[in-house]
Amino acid sequence: MKSLAYFLLIVAFFASITSCQENGIVFPVKQNIEGDFEVVIDGEVFLTNDVSFTVTNQEITITAIKTETNETLILKVDDFSNASFSLEGDENVASYSIEDSASIDIWTTLNATVSRGNIQFSEINFTNNTVSGTFSFIGRNENLGSSKAFSNGSFSNVPRN
């Protein structure tokens, strides 16, 4: 559990310090674009506009935060040159966490040996610095011995951080 929490903290840290230059190409600074992010988690709707993405080499990480409930959902794919990804292993990962004052509970596809879901990009636009797509997955919490279903997930016009 601790190693997964550290992994998520490291991903968030690197996402926050990523520069606006990639392969010698400088991307415009994020404009005031507001993205939409929605997913049904075990029958409950998770909806937020506090969503952004980062790029490191060929890796895209989308982070959606619902601050009022301390929920965070992260989608990471290793090589965005493909449009569709299976969520398994440690390169294409979906993670959902709920944090309270005493602990953090995480449901993830990290290190899954078979596909636990998928993510499909409908648009990756480096001119406007936005991404859009759909996803679904089943996240497993090994500490609690439970799973959560994430269905009908969609993100649109998510701005680059």
Image (cartoon, rainbow, N blue to C red):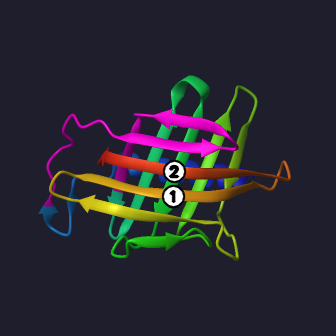
- The secondary element bearing badge 2 is classed as strand
Q: Amino acid at mark 2?
A: Gly
Residue 28, given in percent of the width and then of the height, sits at 14, 49
Q: In percent of the image, x 43 and y 52: which residue is there?
A: 62
On the image, the x and y values in percent for residue 151 come to 60, 52
> Would you call the spot at circle 1 few (<14 residues within 10 Å), some (14-19), or many (20 or more)?
many
- Is residue 107 depicted above or below 49 in this figure? below
Give yes or no for contact between labels 1 and 2 (Cβ–Cβ under 8 Å): yes
Q: Which mark is residue 135?
A: 1
Name the residue carrying label 2.
153
Q: Position of residue 60 (x, y in %)?
A: 39, 61
Residue range in magenta is 26-54
Identify the residue shown where x is 74% and y is 35%.
Answer: 103
In-front residue for pair 27/68:
68
Instruction: Using the image as rendered, state which of residue 131 and residue 16 is in the foreground.
Output: 131
Q: Is residue 41 magenta?
A: yes
